[in-house]
Image (cartoon, helix red, strand yellow):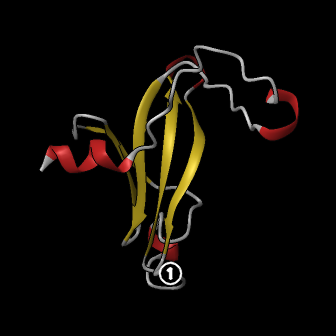
Amino acid sequence: PKQFYSRQLMQPEWMTDVPPDLGSNWYVMPRPEGKRCLLVASRGRTISRLRNGSVLHVMSSPLPEGSPGSAGTTIDFCSLDCIYYEPNKTYYVQDLLSWGAM
């Protein structure tokens, strides 16, 4: 089901007020422009899916299990929460969601 993919991605929160301890007790991560997607490497291929579940790309990648040469040699799969920036065809990793059985 397509809703499955949208639930896997990190949900950022807008900071509407600046907390007094922002400089000492907070981590802030800038968000690059682009399409949010779930990138999954498994069984010798890598698939990226948009939040609505539609396939963005199917490709080989250097991720474990992400290419035919690495299939079955390391872990079962890995999945990443990413942003895809079309102008330079780059995936920016926001979060590591799973790495094999971890």
Number of callouts in the render? 1
**Outermost residue to the front:** 20
Three-letter code for the amino acid on which mark 1 is drawn? Ile
Q: Which residue is mark 1?
A: 75
**Outermost residue to the bottom:** 73
Task: Please state if 25 lies on the left or on the right of 38 as rendered.
Answer: right
Instruction: Locate residue 72, reporting x and y percent.
Output: 44, 84
Q: Residues within 10 Å of mark 1 (few under 14, many from 20)?
A: some
Q: Is residue 52 above or below residue 71?
A: above
Could you tell me which residue is drawn at 54 percent across and 83 percent down? 74
Instruction: Locate residue 32, reporting x and y percent.
Output: 61, 23
Q: Is residue 86 above or below residue 98?
A: above
Could you tell me which residue is drawn at 87 percent across and 29 percent down? 23
Front one among 87 and 92:
92
Instruction: Locate residue 100, reporting x and y percent.
Output: 48, 77
Could you tell me which residue is drawn at 72 percent across and 32 percent down? 28
Q: Is residue 59 above or below residue 19?
A: below
Q: Is residue 44 above or below residue 35?
A: below
Instruction: Locate residue 63, reporting x and y percent.
Output: 56, 62
Could you tell me which residue is drawn at 52 percent across and 85 percent down? 73
Front one among 87 and 22:
22
